[in-house]
Image: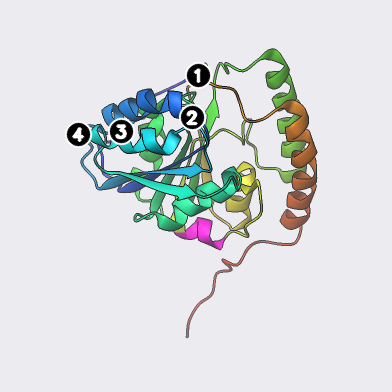
Amino acid sequence: MYVSGETMNKGTVPFSLVVAVVNERENIPALIGEIAAALDGYAADHEVIFVDDGSTDGTPEELAVQRKVLPNLRILLHGSNRGKSAALRTGIFSARFDIVVTMDGDGQNDPADIHTLLAPFADGNPRLGLVAGQRIKRQDTLSKRVASRLANRLRRRLLKDAARDSVCGWKAFRRGLYLDFPYFDNMHRFLIALAIREGFEIRLVDVRDRLRVHGKSKYTNFGRLMVGLPDLLGMAWLMHRGVGRRTPAKEI
């Protein structure tokens, strides 16, 4: 059952919101307005970073216009399309706060769920490394839902990450933990497994999913398969090569 984090989180967690976009000009005004509404009155320090990954439809110009709605908006530009993982990495490297939240820029993620992702960090548990959203009542086509279900089943079998929806755009994590991850294209699909590999706790939370209003998805089932299967096998190899670098040590 979906439970919003808005009532649980009182704005006690400073954070950076990072959104990677490419050719989403028509979706930008509504999305920025919803982000502004979701963060209105938020007590702790925060920032919003949009990384444009080589758009050709005027997305950067529309983002600049939206600064009147969201004054703390930061806009970073890639000169050419480098992929979602690279765009997120650019934003995360530029983030000013320890907790980073990521969401998709196509309007299918509800910005009100920012609070749901942040709420678990309000407890101050130092071992909590990552909170991942899992979409309920997905609004994708039947073929995408079936393909995703099969892919997630295979991923859980190989990586043992317990997630039913690892590719959901909603993630919240410690920036320092992310910087310890090995970088590779499409790594954003494996952040849960990478956090587990580093020995941190993860939390899975339900989030809403919405229909895309404008534009088309940048991915197809075939395209996901062509890049996803080699990545999954490589990630399975990495998981079996031992834990990450955070081996406990005592100084004497």
Q: Where is residue 248, by image quadrant? A: bottom right
- Residue 25 screen position, x and y as percent: 45, 28
Helix, strand or loop at label 1? It is: loop
* Front position in the image: 109 or 70: 70
Answer yes or no: is residue 114 visible: yes
- Judged from the image, the secondary structure of the residue bearing numbered disc 4 is loop
Q: Are marks 1 and 4 in contact (CB under 8 Å)?
A: no
Residue 62: x and y in percent read 37, 32
- Left or right side of 172 for 184: right
Residue segment shown in magenta: 176-180
Q: Which mark is residue 24?
A: 2
- Please say whether residue 135 is one of the residues in the magenta stretch: no
- Cα gap from disc 1 to disc 2, whole angstroms: 8 Å
Residue 156 image point, x, y percent = 72, 37
- Comes first in the chain, label 3 or label 4: 4
Instruction: Please tell me how crowded label 2 is: few (under 14), some (14-19), or many (20+) other residues with Cα within 10 Å.
Output: many
Q: Amino acid at mark 1?
A: His
Q: Which of pointers 1 and 4 lies earlier in the amino acid sequence?
A: 4
- First in sequence: mark 2 or mark 3? 2
Q: Nearer the viewer, residue 14 or 225?
A: 225
Estimate how packed mark 1 is, as few (under 14), some (14 to 19) or many (20 or more) residues with alpha carbons within 10 Å: few
Residue 220 in percent (x, y) is at 71, 27
Extreme residue toward the top, this view: 142
Residue appearing at x 57%, y 16% in the figure: 139
Residue that carries the numbered disc 4 in the rendered image? 41
User: In the image, what residue type sits under mark 4?
Assistant: Gly
**Mark positioned earlier in the residue sequence (1 or 2):** 2
Instruction: Name the residue: 66% across, 50% down.
Output: 185
> Seen in the image, is 212 located left or right of residue 44?
right
Q: Are marks 1 and 2 in contact (CB under 8 Å)?
A: yes
Give the mark nearer the N terminus: 4 vs 2.
Answer: 2
Question: Callout 4: few (<14), some (14-19), or many (20+) C-alpha neighbours within 10 Å?
Answer: few
